[in-house]
Image (spheres, grey):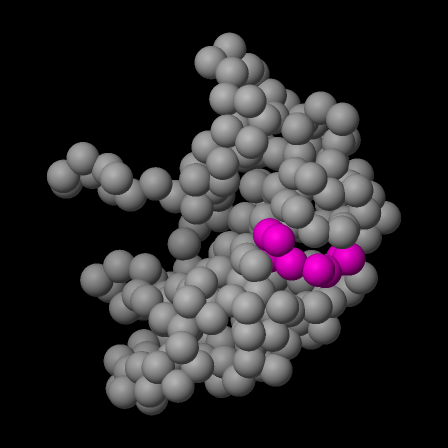
Amino acid sequence: MPAEGKPPLKPEQIAWIRAWIQQGASPTVTSLAGVVIREERKDPPLQQVEDYSARMPEIVQAAQAAGVTLTPVSSNLRDGLILNTVNVASRFGDAQLAQFTKFAPYIVEVELGRTVVTNACFDTLARFTHLRAIHLEGTTITGDGLAKLAPLSQLIYLNLSETKVTQASIAPLSSMKNLHHLYLYDTPAQPISAAVAGEPAANKATK
């Protein structure tokens, strides 16, 4: 937990720590297999979402009915919502995700790790045009249809660790110029060695 008054860890920082532990937690390691971080590129300016304050009762009701949480990123509602499925992961699939399409203009992050979504989820996620982060680790996706995410210009973080994605299926991601954080740990697409920072490793993993 962060010290009082300090910001919490970002999803990508948690993923770095998890990958580091899974790969031996060496205090001298300078690279992590399956982790691509393009530090030399700055994240795009944060785009605010539409004002959804009037829809909060509807949003809360939908979240409670599905057993998920839709949490504001900050006290400024226009920073968007985070869809978290951790409490219902084993029964949250493509149909359940599709039910939240009506709130797509307000959702900036979806945490679908360990859920039962399939490649069909990419059709739905493509409609979440404000997405900045997608967690799909530990799902059964193979990556077929990943190209449908290419129009998501705000997407900077994508976690595909522990899935069945291949180098061929992630190839379309190379066109996503703002996708700075790509996690491929324990997948067929995992590069032999991925530097923690720098363009060469990013090229190796995504091109």
| Percent of width and height locating residue 131 | 51, 62
The answer to if 141 sits in the magenta stretch is yes
Q: Considering depth in this image, is 195 or 190 the residue closer to the camera?
A: 190
| Percent of width and height locating residue 64 | 35, 82
Magenta stretch mostly in which secondary structure?
loop
Which corner quadrant holds the N terminus? Answer: top left
Q: Residue furthest front?
A: 90
Up-down relation of residue 165 to residue 67 (above or below): above
| Residue 122 in view of the camera | yes
| Percent of width and height locating residue 26 | 51, 16
Q: Which residues are magenta?
A: 136-143
Up-down relation of residue 20 to residue 85 (above or below): above
Q: Residue furthest left?
A: 4
| Percent of width and height locating residue 44 | 48, 48
Q: Is residue 197 left or right of residue 57?
A: right
Residue, x 52% and y 28% (percent of image)?
20
Residue, x 54% and y 49% (percent of image)?
156
| Residue 196 in view of the camera | no
